[in-house]
Amino acid sequence: MTGTVAVIDYGMGNLHSVASALEHVGADDVIVTHDAELLRSADRVVFPGVGAIRDCMAEIRRLHCDELLTTALVEQHKPVLAICVGMQALMTRSQENGGVDCLDILDGEVRFFGKGLHEQSGERLKVPHMGWNRVSQTRTHPLWQGIEDGSRFYFVHSYHVVAQDRELVAGSAHYGVEVDAALARDNLFAVQFHPEKSDTAGLQLLRNFLHWNGQC
């Protein structure tokens, strides 16, 4: 039994693709909601997101999803998985939209890849970073179980996370610069890539999440 998985719905992102992927890997019950009682009663929580961070943060706060997320993480200590802009929203601040204060759950900044991004070889890189990229597992974690180090995951982003506490980094990728692709602390695991779009490796990560007890 995997219990109920609540996907936080604040109106940003293809939430039903995440829900469908969770059902595909064996979730007993998946709900897409911002209802406080449903989120409090769920066994685990997914915090997804796509789009501009300013709009995301406005909706997160308007619907009190920030408070519900803190309750799940701190008071109830249930497993939480953040995806893409959901990961970025956890940080202290983002450079996007002229600078936006985020939730400050994790200490760090979200930075723009920049114009004229290129590799040391001289290869010019497109921004947004869109496509498959290898992720190096920088520390062991239950959500990496059964996933080969260096597996490819699907990314879509113009901004990337830089965590202040480097011990939080559970996975990294390279796209012109080093990218903090996964962060982990206690019962929280956050990824910049989209596991629901990442074929076998991504589905395995979601499967691992369903059976994770929130301990590293």
Image (spheres, rainbow, N blue to C red):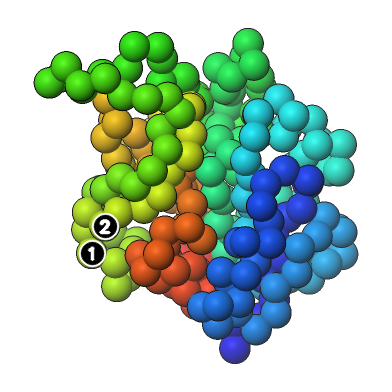
Q: Indicate the position of residue 171 as horizontal and vertical percent values.
A: 32, 47
- Residue 213 visible in the snapshot: no
Q: What residue do we see at 64% from left, 16% from top?
A: 97
Q: Is residue 103 above or below residue 124?
A: below
Residue 7 position, x and y percent, is 69, 60
The amino acid at mark 2 is: Ser
Residue 74, placed above or below residue 110: below
Question: Is 122 in front, or is 144?
Answer: 122
| Mark 2, residue position | 151
- Crowdedness near tag 2: few (<14), some (14–19) or many (≥20) residues, C-alpha within 10 Å: some
> Residue 58: horizontal and vertical position, in percent?
79, 30
Please tell me which residue lies in front, 93 or 86: 86
Q: Name the residue nearer the viewer: 4 or 157.
A: 157
In the displayed structure, does residue 156 sit left or right of residue 176? right
Where residue 51 is drawn, which disc sits there? Answer: none
Instruction: From the image, tell me which residue sits under label 1.
Output: 148
The answer to which image quadrant residue 162 occupies is: top left
What's the distance in space between the residues labelled 2 and 1, CA to CA? Answer: 6 Å
Residue drawn at the location 82% of the way across and 55% of the way down: 34
The reply to whether dot 2 and dot 1 touch (C-beta < 8 Å) is yes
Residue farthest bottom in this picture: 1
Dot 1, how many residues are within 10 Å of its Cα: few (below 14), some (14-19), or many (20+)? few
Image point (67%, 47%), residue name? 13
